Amino acid sequence: MKGIFSALMVPYNEDGSINEKGLREIVRHNIDNMKVDGLYVGGSTGENFMISTEEKKRVFEIAIDEAKDQVQLIAQVGSINVFESVELGKYATELGYKCLSAVTPFYYKFSFEEIKEYYFTIVRETGNNMIIYSIPFLTGVNMSVAQFGELFANEKIIGVKFTAGDFFLLERMRKAYPNKLILAGFDEMLLPAAVLGIDGAIGSTYNVNGLRAKEIFRLAKEGKIAEALEIQHVTNDLIEGILSNGLYGTIKEIMKLQGVDAGYCRRPMAKVTPEQVAGAKVLFDKYLAK
């Protein structure tokens, strides 16, 4: 589970249902055009926390059917309902996913012992590998190097999706756990994370900017930092524009310009405005048009 992974976007129809044809197109676009090494399926980029258990299963089904073993796949099954996480984890495992991921349980202020039991329950019940999804700025869950070590003591917990700006913690973890996977989660900080020795990265903008991400990661691994930095500058100009225009809606509009039926966002996310559509076109023309 190394390299550049797109956090898979999911297109929805105007009535909120999954656009299954569009989802297949997004999978193919990531594999064929963005050349990613893998797909992270069922994460927040797929608007996962706004859909039902059965819809999550359908996304897992379509993604693995369309990918056809061409790339590495990770199924994100995390929920504050551990029974749902186990159900989804078993289902994804039966479908053929070789690795699961789960966001730290959020909203309630769970103790670390409760969080640890949550992860241990999922891996015990599914028998599959697990990558922790640590995203403190959204979950409010911060864990120390020692606490990650307690989780990593379980041989089925093979790594972490590290979506945090604490690069001191990232460096300490890389040194402490050289045999565990660390996948960076902030697209705008791919280069500094790569310099610190990550094994790969998972990001939403890789759905449209995967080629640059792969180049940044390759150059960093080769020690060509100045060259990688130039590409990171351009990437961050694009990311800055996407964020100011509306993250998910803008990425979907850019994908449409790349020839993909990327659909709509799931309510309560708003439908993109004509101004946002125009803004996405400006970004596409400036940074992504060939």
Image (cartoon, rainbow, N blue to C red):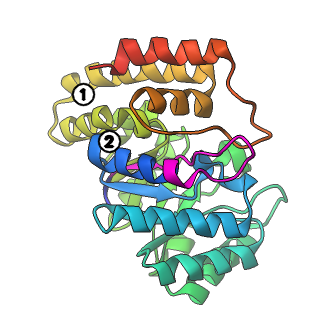
- Look at the image and give the residue range highlighted in magenta: 4-22
Question: Residue 13 magenta-drawn?
Answer: yes
- Distance in Å between CA atoms under marks 2 and 1: 10 Å
Which residue is labeled 1 in the image? 228
Visible residue check, residue 223: yes
| Relative side of 42 to 29, left or right | right
Q: Whole-percent x and y of residue 180? A: 38, 66
The image quadrant of residue 277 is top right
> Which of the marked residues, 2 or 1, is nearer the chain's N terminus?
2
Looking at the image, which residue is at 38% across and 12% down? 286
- Amino acid carrying label 1: it is Ala
Q: State whether residue 223 is above or below residue 156.
A: above
Which residue reaches farthest right? Answer: 108
Query: Quarter holding the C terminus?
Result: top left
- In the displayed structure, does residue 49 sit left or right of residue 177? right
| Amino acid tagged 2 | Ala
Q: Is residue 239 or residue 185 the one in the foreground?
A: 239
Identify the residue at horizontal 28%, vertical 23% (top origin): 231
* Circles 2 and 1 in contact, beta carbons < 8 Å: yes
Report which residue position mark 2 lands on: 194
Quick one: SS at disc 1?
A: helix
